[in-house]
């Protein structure tokens, strides 16, 4: 779990987290070791943070990158990163908007659709 706000990211809220990194997103990502088997789900609180995280992750070898957000927002971020020189082939590998299309509406249903997509990807679907 990565966030820079102690009130949102702490052991009390996430007692089962393997690791809690309280830092800005890009700094925290640079501290992590990637093996190529990671599933990355990007859901920050701003479009700018999403773009910075995505740009950082695209330089890593990972198994899956998914991002929450509207098609419009994701298009803007991808265009911004393309203009910054990010590889278009890499940008096409991003699963966005994330989640299986089950017409999820509530946060709980959206979480289920995201988890289902991760499981489907792991299972080769």
Image (cartoon, grey):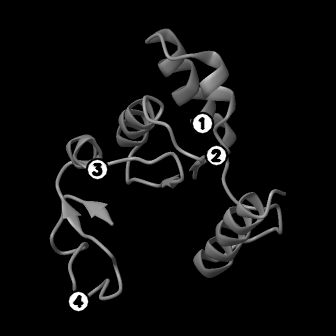
Per the image, the residue denoted by label 3 is 32
Residue 70's mark? 2
Q: Residues within 10 Å of mark 1 (few under 14, many from 20)?
A: many
Mark 1 lies on residue: 74
Label 2 element class: loop
The secondary structure type at the circle numbered 1 is helix
Residue 79 percent location from the top left of the image: 57, 19
Q: Residues within 10 Å of mark 3 (few under 14, many from 20)?
A: few
Residue 9 in picture, x, y percent from top left: 24, 72
Residue 8, by quadrant, is bottom left
Sequence-wise, which precedes: disc 1 or disc 4?
4
Q: Is residue 64 above or below residue 101?
A: above
Q: Left of 36 or right of it: where is 74?
A: right
Residue 7 is situated, as x and y percent measured from the top left of the image, at: 18, 75
Give the structural element (helix, strand or loop) at label 4: loop
Q: What residue is pinned by disc 4?
A: 12
Earlier in the chain: of badge 4 and badge 2, it is: 4
């Amino acid at each position: 779990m990565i966030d820079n706000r102690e009130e949102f990211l702490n052991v009390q809220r996430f007692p089962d987290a393997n690791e809690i990194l309280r830092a800005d997103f890009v700094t925290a990502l640079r501290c992590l070791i990637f093996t190529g088997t990671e599933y990355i789900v990007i859901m920050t609180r701003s479009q700018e943070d999403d773009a910075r995280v995505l740009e950082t992750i695209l330089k890593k070898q990972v198994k899956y990158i998914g991002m929450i957000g509207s098609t419009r927002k994701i298009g803007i971020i991808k265009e911004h990163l393309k203009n910054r020189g990010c590889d278009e082939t890499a940008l096409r590998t991003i699963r966005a908007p994330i989640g299986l299309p089950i017409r999820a509406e509530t946060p709980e249903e959206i979480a289920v659709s995201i988890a289902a997509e991760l499981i489907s990807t792991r299972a080769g679907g």
